[in-house]
Amino acid sequence: MFTSKEEFKKAFLQRLEMMFGKSFQDSTRREHFQTLGNMIREYISSDWIKTNEQYRASGEKQVYYLSIEFLLGRLLRNNLMNLGIENIVYEGLYDLGIDLAEVEEAEADAGLGNGGLGRLAACFLDSLATLNLPGHGFGIRYKHGLFEQKIVDGYQVELPEHWLRHGNVWEVRRADLAVQVPFWGKVEAVSEDGCLQFRHINTETVTAVPYDLPIVGYKTKTVNTLRLWSAQPSPYPVNKDVLKYKRETESISEFLYPDDTHDEGKILRLKQQYFLVSASIQSIIRSYLSTHSSLLDFHKHVSIHINDTHPALAIPELMRILLDEEKMGWDEAWNITKNTISYTNHTTLSEALEKWPIRIFQPLLPRIFMIVDEINERFCKELWDRYPGDWERIEKMAIVAHGEVRMAHLALAGCYSVNGVARLHTDILKKREMNLFYEVFPDKFNNKTNGISHRRWLLKSNPGLAKLISETIGTSWIDSPAQLERLIEFRDDPAFLKKLSSIKKENKNSLAAIIKEKTGVTVDPSSIFDVHVKRLHAYKRQLLNILHIMHLYNRIKEDSSFSIYPRTFIFGAKASPGYYYAKKIIKLINSVADIINNDPDLNDQLKVIFLENYRVSLAEEIFPAADISEQISTASKEASGTGNMKFMMNGAITVGTLDGANIEIMEKVGEENIFIFGLTADEVLHYYQHGGYNARDYYHHDYRIHQVLDSLVNGFFPDAEGEFEAIYDSLIMQNDQYFVLRDFASYVDIQQKAGEAFEDQDRWLKMSLMNIAKSGHFSSDRTIAEYANDIWKIKATNPMINS
Ligand SMILES: *Cc1c(COP(=O)(O)O)cnc(C)c1O
């Protein structure tokens, strides 16, 4: 294609004219992006084909990662970097008077996810390809990703997102590989050669069309595939109003559900789940049978991973194909299935455990329901043999009970591996949430602490820091992130610490410019940037943060001798549109910001910023500029967190509870390099079990809390009369389920300590250095290597073979 800047420029200009039929002078930034994207996709294609050929020829075991979300963000810069052509392209465009950074802005974020779960899937794809592992993603090509958030008068307003408006340069539509997914209808039993067989008839069929995206590994020739399914009408709908059928069909891949914790209870959501699963499994089997004569050894050559329970119907779907199409017996089919599927649990929040009412499930998926019912019958029978007479236990563990299908139980019964996403989380699964299953299947349970792609979250998004690291310890950390530990040697090197400090300062300057542009507020880059970015949820306790800010405000106003080191509190968070309480908290943050940012008495000691539309591309601007990372969930509630890892890797210091992966972060960096406060998970769980917490006592006995909570309801916010009563009630009337008031005092103390630590810049920079140095463990390369070795049993292919 091109191997030099000059070749690139020539090819770029030719391609631009060819694609848009106009001269370079008249072309727009979007056209530059489209041209470049098109060239890069083509650049990738020969390695993509070779990788697929090699996988087919070698017969290596393949992994398929099924996820209802892939939060990819932008792909241009990542692809350039991974292909090793970033410099050629940057310089070539520069010669033409084009800034690559501006071209990048023309790419829409692929926001096919809500938060951590979807971003994890994206980081995993990056690591799989980079480690030359044969692992591919399957997801849904939602026409509209997660909504675009606007803040109007302090309230969240949701606008539909339209990432495909100008097409998607990375995808390849593979209409030749479309499959049919059946819904509704009924099941007919027929006798074939003396055997009872089942046929699903009178179905309403949807066509699943795959769109493939290449997943390029970092400086390797491996190019894996992310296959996203789009729902389209099938050619011959039966007995149906054609327009209605078309509308219903297309709605399956229309919207991502803007919710990552509550089960919306919608038929459409179940349709989406089966659509993803059925299309993916059919596609996997079709590809398998192109090189194997039967499915008898399927599980030895294929692993199918389900990212949470949304794709758990993979279990009955694989059974269906083995039973009805391959005509296997039950035991044989079950043996293959339960040795193929592995499962990751992402939460212990009970409201997030998926359960489908039979009255919805059975008519929509009649044959799948029969199979689930049979799995349940046999599972309960086994339990009966093991625990004769223990009805209570069997009822608790059943897959189908009380008119519902319990997806987590289906996943647990039908997989060979279940993992939690941080050590504490896995322990809670084993000891509490899934203890009954752990007793029956102790060997299935294992932990895989989450990770993040250090290439996207450091090398790409913080080029200044990445350069300093490479100049200091060489570039080996890019392939082996554990090498970052070598930075520890430079702990006492003033020249290094000075550079570290000036890089942070530059990143803060850039973020300050973004804040100015987006909000009009001027923030001081030498103030502490204290950052809380993640989905808005009660358990993540953005409320604790804003109540503390209100308290600081009160203190400064009341006591003219009191002062603090200047702080800029930065928030970014989307609330699920139906999550009333979360939206109140967004409004509260904005109301507090309004008062604080406009009060001259504060002498710029405090600023509060809410950045709208938090998403991957914005996150990439925020993490490099953070001094403090807010990870203050109610202990036991955050399964792992991955934002905490991105902050650490960019040199921010965590203020956090002993929750999720914060615990492992503390063990790595040492207690002196993190600010830990609040209840432990055991203490929280003890309160839940035995009671003993009375939030009202904290209101009455802590003057600071009293004052702050009163201002929620006493007219303190002139623009928000009656607005915050729900928040007040949740804390006082409903006894503060998330222990915000219980942890308030220790949060105030730790925040004060953090502020004081910052004033000693030498100490702070050393803390920052330690966080960067120890962050290699939280690379998704480490996580994926563990999945590959312990769960999937897959090996790296030799990248030299496909050169
Ligand atoms: C990393 C990331 C998340 C997850 O953040 P947590 O703090 O772990 O909840 C959510 N959204 C985006 C855009 C991210 O990049």
Image (tube, grey):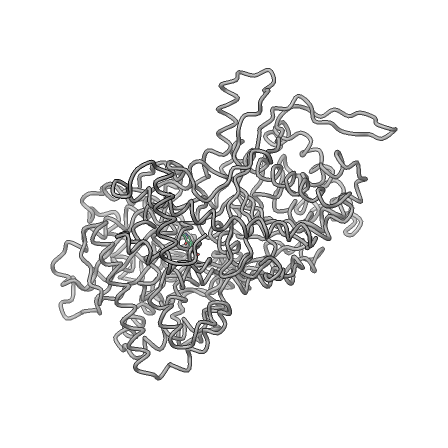
Location of residue 446 by image quarter: bottom right
Query: Eyeballing the image, is 213 above or below 159?
Result: below
Residue 614 image position (x, y, % from top left): 35, 49
Instruction: Please give left or right for residue 706 compared with residue 482 in the image.
Output: left
Ligand 1: quadrant of the figure = bottom left
Closer to the camera, 50 or 453? 50
From the top left corner, tell me how far across and down residue 706 is, in percent. 27, 57
Give the residue furthest to the right: 194
How far across and how far down the image is residue 454, in percent? Answer: 45, 63
- Residue at (59% x, 20% y) in the render: 236
Q: Nearer the viewer, residue 231 or 75?
A: 75
Of 585 and 162, nearer the camera is: 162
Q: Is residue 696 visible?
A: no
Residue 62 in picture, x, y percent from top left: 65, 52
Can see residue 529? yes
Question: Compared to 127, does 108 lie above or below?
Answer: above
**Foreground of the two, 76 or 206:** 76
Which quarter of the figure has residue 407?
top right
Q: In the picture shown, does residue 36 fall above or below 499? A: above
Say which quadrant the C terminus sits in.
bottom right
Indicate left or right for 254 with 288 as reference.
Answer: left
Residue 785 versus residue 229 in the image, above or below? below
**Residue drawn at (42%, 79%) of the image:** 488
